[in-house]
Image: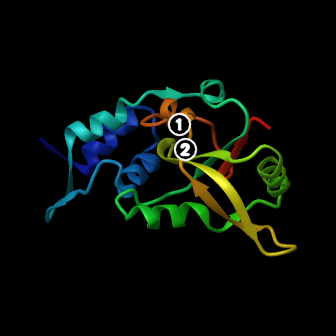
């Protein structure tokens, strides 16, 4: 059954999202491609209910699922875009120099190897990978990440929501 964007937003709001987050989730394509009509965009009700029912993990559950370092990207991304376009959008233009995240990531990559990477849209996990390399200009703070396939750790986070509270467009965990 198809429901209006307003009804879909209400279902997501009732699941704990703000109105703004619910609209962003729908715009990202997490509920699939809407069916446009003259009066509204329509969404598949089962898909929206599935999103609303996704299990939520708090900071402690995420840390248990992925002990050690974890980079959580909190950026809007079109999940219906081609995979290479999604990865490009999620791996470029990270300002990591403000709090030394660039140094932490570089040291971890050099000493311990890849860093788990999870991308979220309003808390909904949309991609799992491992950061294998940081690429940036000397003296700059903006970096591009190179990613590899996720490890077994990602099984616990796939198809979940993570609640890490407000803040920057990324969270470094396990440092």
Residue shown at the point (84%, 51%) measured from the top left: 107
Q: Which mark is residue 137?
A: none
Decide: few, some or many residues near mark 2? Use Cα within 10 Å; few <14, some 14-19, many ≥20: some
Decide: few, some or many residues near mark 1? Use Cα within 10 Å; few <14, some 14-19, many ≥20: some
Residue shown at the point (26%, 40%) measured from the top left: 47
The local secondary structure at tag 2 comes to loop
Q: Mark 1 points at which residue?
A: 154
Residue shown at the point (39%, 31%) measured from the top left: 54
Q: Where is residue 154 in the image (x, y as percent from the top left)?
A: 53, 36
Asked if disc 1 and disc 2 are in contact, CB closer than 8 Å, the reply is yes
Q: Where is residue 58 in the image (x, y as percent from the top left)?
A: 59, 28
Residue shown at the point (78%, 43%) measured from the top left: 112
Q: Mark 2 points at which residue?
A: 150
The local secondary structure at tag 1 comes to helix
- Quarter holding residue 138: bottom right
Q: In this view, does 129 lie above or below 77?
A: above
Q: Position of residue 175 (x, y in %)?
A: 80, 38
Q: In this view, does 114 lie to the left or right of 148?
A: right
Q: Which one is in front, 139 or 17?
A: 139
Q: In this view, does 36 lie above or below 110?
A: below
> Whole-Å distance between the Cαs marked 1 and 2?
6 Å
Q: Which one is in front, 159 or 123?
A: 159
Quadrant (top left, top right, bottom left, bottom right) of the N terminus: top left
Q: Which one is in front, 142 or 19?
A: 142
Q: Is residue 25 left or right of residue 164?
A: left
Q: Where is residue 98 in the image (x, y as percent from the top left)?
A: 83, 59
């Amino acid at each position: 059954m198809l429901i209006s964007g307003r009804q879909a937003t209400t279902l997501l709001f009732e699941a704990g999202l703000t109105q703004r987050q619910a609209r962003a989730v729908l715009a990202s394509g997490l509920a699939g491609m809407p069916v446009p009509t003259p009066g509204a965009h329509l969404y598949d009700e089962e898909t929206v209910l599935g999103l609303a029912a996704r299990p939520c993990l708090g900071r402690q559950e995420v840390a248990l699922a992925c002990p050690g370092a974890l980079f959580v990207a909190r950026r809007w991304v079109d999940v219906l875009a081609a995979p290479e376009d999604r990865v490009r959008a999620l791996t470029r233009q990270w300002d990591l120099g403000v709090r030394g995240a660039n140094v932490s990531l570089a040291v971890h990559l050099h000493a311990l190897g890849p860093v788990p990477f999870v991308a979220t849209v309003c808390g909904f996990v949309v991609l799992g990978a491992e950061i294998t390399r940081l690429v940036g200009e000397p003296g700059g703070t903006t970096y591009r990440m190179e990613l590899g396939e996720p490890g077994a750790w990602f099984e616990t986070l796939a198809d979940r929501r993570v609640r890490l509270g407000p803040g920057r467009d990324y969270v470094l965990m396990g440092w």
